[in-house]
Image: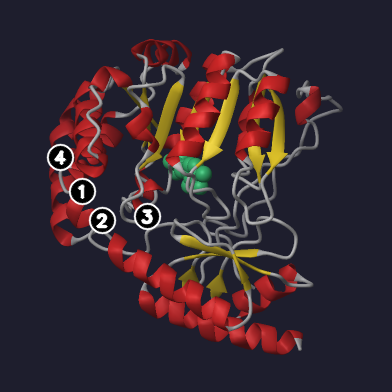
Amino acid sequence: MVMPFGFAPSVEPIKVPGAFELPIRDDLQGVTSYGAPQLDVPVCLNVNENPFPLPDEVVSAITASVQLVARGLNRYPQRDAVALRQALGDYLASESGVEVPWRQIWAANGSNEVMHHLFLAFGGPGRLALSFDPTYSMYPEYARDTFTAYKSFPRRADFTIDVAGACAQISDNRPSLVLVTAPNNPTGTALDVADLRKLLIAAQQCGAMLIVDEAYAEFRRVGTPSALALLAEFANLVVTRTMSKAFGMAGTRLGYAAVADPAVVDTLGVVRLPYHLSSVTQAVAIAALSHSSSLQAQVATIRDERDALQDWLLGQGFAVARSDANFILFGKFGDREAVWQRLLDQGVLIRVTGPEGYLRVSIGAPAENDRFRVALMSAIGEEG
Ligand SMILES: *Cc1c(COP(=O)(O)O)cnc(C)c1O
């Protein structure tokens, strides 16, 4: 049996004393924490990480900067993380050509925390968040945590957003938050800037913030602009990014947002917990940002591997969602759980997610993608 990481056959739990009903929030009773299974298998293609370990020179730079801050760990971290936010601004300028001053950049422990802050600041009781399904499975959880109502509007059969329909939904429902994932997870679908502009106008007319989740932006096709290009035009625009995917730093937990209006950042500062970003996280992220090109040296390889795997899957007769990200949604299977299990039995872990009948595979290193191909052929051979 494959054991989850960190799972040890441990001591019996301490006996729970007496009968006491825990005053758990009504809406949390019986809810279990959810996340992709973390299994110790040879080929992990399930959570869209960059498969390449950090190069030696980056490991040295990170080690040196952590050593520098270590002596000062008796003190709380720099609360406003200014140096980090400046470094993130420099990175965005080099990556997308858009200059974003540090006062318009927010950083937190993963873009998940950034999004949580946005829900705390702009959601809440009596307010609505609107998104476009199938999309990232965490959004409803941020809504639940912050007592924000949540509604999603279905994407088209090819997973693009029906922009006219979406604008009508925005005007009819009057959300305070609109969430657009581009490229979308789990489908990989890109969003055209002209379409985004229409959504921003509709959101602005009903007083809503529009958040573009660009976790996978670095994998977009060459020549596709980032939503950052529209920051100068729309005060209600927030673009979130992360160092977890293309950047190859998922273990660091560093996400960030670029906003049009610095007042957004000020408000996120109100709802964050004190000293939310540790000195170690800040030091690691700054060191990594100064090596962003070596960390992302393999992004072109990942894109080529994605395109090759996409063509191969199509050639094998699968339904494949066209992807601008580092994963591919494919199907359709009568019993996707069974196919997932047969891949796992061969040491290849992918993800059961998205619409019924589909599976999602992250793009790995070339040898991992080859193992996936072989395992998949064998898995569907068994399906008969
Ligand atoms: C992976 C992912 C993130 C990144 O989360 P982090 O908390 O930064 O690791 C954000 N949004 C989407 C849609 C993702 O798939």
Distance from the alpha carbon under mark 2 to that under mark 3? 10 Å
Q: Are marks 2 and 4 in contact (CB under 8 Å)?
A: no
Q: Mark 2 points at which residue?
A: 296
Residue visible at 65% across and 25% down in the picture = 170
Q: Are marks 2 and 3 in contact (CB under 8 Å)?
A: no
- In front: label 1 or label 4: 1
The amino acid beneath tag 3 is Phe
Q: Nearer the viewer, residue 261 or 125?
A: 261
Distance from the alpha carbon under mark 1 to that under mark 4? 16 Å
Q: Are marks 1 and 3 in contact (CB under 8 Å)?
A: no
Give the quadrant of the N terminus: bottom right
Residue visible at 60% across and 57% down in the picture = 37
Mark closer to the chain start, 1 or 4: 4
Q: Mark 3 points at which residue?
A: 219
- Secondary structure at numbered mark 4: helix
- Secondary structure at numbered mark 2: loop
Residue 116 % position (x, y): 53, 27
Residue 292 image label: 1
Distance from the alpha carbon under mark 4 to that under mark 3? 28 Å
Mark closer to the chain start, 1 or 3: 3
Asked whether mark 4 and ligand 1 are closer than 8 Å, the reply comes as: no
Distance from the alpha carbon under mark 1 to that under mark 3? 14 Å
Asked whether mark 3 and ligand 1 are closer than 8 Å, the reply comes as: no
Horizontal side of 176 relative to 209 (left or right) equals right
Residue 89 % position (x, y): 23, 31
